[in-house]
Image: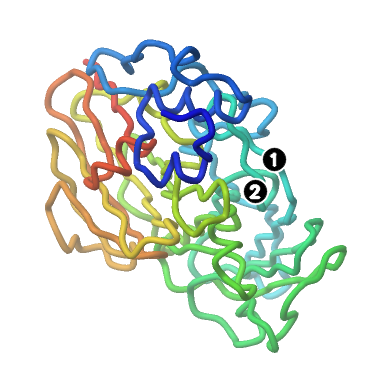
Amino acid sequence: MSKDMSRRDFFRAGALTVLATAGAAAIANKVDPAAAAPPIHPGHEIGTPTVVGEVDHRRNGFNPTETLTGFDRGELLELVNGQTLRQYEIRAVDKTIEVVPGIEFEAWTYNGRIPGPTLRCKEGELVRINFINEGSHPHSIHFHGIHTAEMDGVEGAGPGLVGPGESATYEFEAQPAGLHPYYSHTFPLTPALSRGLFGAFIVEPKAGWPQVDQELVMVLNGLDLYRTNSNNFYAVNGIPFHFQKHPINIRVNETVRLFLVNMLNLEPVNTFHLHSAFFQYYPSGTSLTAAQYTDTLTLGLAQRGILEFSYQFPGFYIFRAQMPRAAELGYLGVFQVSI
């Protein structure tokens, strides 16, 4: 590789493997990537290629493993009419995030993290979101669901666009039950979605879902590092390669409920494939009857669903994008199944 090859050309060439990731960092520091490249580093027993080293989760202010089970249930208040109010505070913040060791990303975030907090409530509750824009660009919050036009988080209705230093309040009754995304609806939409302003919104049915052993949240996204309208990395819960280095622990015959939201921008579809097991799939989570029993999904932007599955045998099992490029560039993880 020529020393004067630009980072843009480097990524567009599709050459980012484990060695090339180290090479990208070397290019950024004007070092010969061939001299800087470490040996291939397998991720656990299954031998999946991954980056060498670890991002600084503490400095980033969030950890993808904690996002798996980090449900924000808000502050509960009871209104005089007996209805439950759940109140949340969300801040838009510009933030530099290390996405792979040595490579940083100028992100726009909700509450300083990618994805934003996973908001969880019950169907029929009143939800109030106090939104403060501490970023450098106008933003909003658009929730999928059923609500008035004034609460839709779009320009010209209700609070509309919330400028830097301004605040707004969104308030609506949570409906329908299911799994929904939220994100900034400020035009142009591409930067907000590509730079991290999105999250998951879970509305439980009034009677709840059947009990399971574990509930997990995965939000899928891409990272356009150099704003060229192409994804350089792919991630689960914000950080590429994380779940190769940090397998998710489950036990044989445990039932896992996975809330899966696709927020991959700049590409028409994303995919999810579970190795060595099948799952019951509930699109959008709005029905208690599964629509499919399968091991692979294809999802457009903002499509989502609930997956329920278990493993019959112990071992290390991959979950990943079915698209090879996305799997090789960060969207691949491991379930560690024990007895």
Q: Nearer the viewer, residue 114 or 293?
A: 114
Q: Quadrant of the N terminus?
A: top left
Q: Residue at x 28, y 64 (%)?
A: 283
Vertical order, 318 against 320 (above or below): above
Q: Which residue is mark 2?
A: 107
Q: Residues within 10 Å of mark 1 (few under 14, many from 20)?
A: some
Instruction: Look at the numbered discs 1 and 2 and tell me whether their residues touch, using CB distance below 8 Å.
Output: yes
**Looking at the image, is mark 1 or mark 2 earlier in the sequence?**
1
Q: Of the numbered discs in the image, which one, if any, rests on residue 96?
A: 1
Q: Residue 180's spot in the image, x, y percent?
A: 45, 64
Q: Residue at x 24, y 58 (%)?
A: 298
Q: CA distance from mark 1 to mark 2?
A: 6 Å
Q: Residue at x 56, y 31 (%)?
A: 63
**In the shown orientation, is residue 132 left or right of residue 29?**
right
Q: Residue 79's spot in the image, x, y percent?
A: 71, 69
Q: Residue 196's spot in the image, x, y percent?
A: 58, 53
- Residue type pointed to by label 2: Ala
| Quarter of the rendering containing residue 230 | bottom left
Q: Nearer the viewer, residue 285 or 294?
A: 294
Q: Quadrant of the C terminus?
A: top left
**Colour scheme in use:** rainbow
**In the shown orientation, is residue 175 left or right of residue 306?**
right
Q: Residue at x 70, y 88 (%)?
A: 156
Q: Nearer the viewer, residue 24 or 91?
A: 24
| Quarter of the rendering containing residue 205 | bottom left
**In the shown orientation, is residue 283 left or right of residue 60?**
left
SS at circle 2: strand
- Residue type pointed to by label 1: Thr
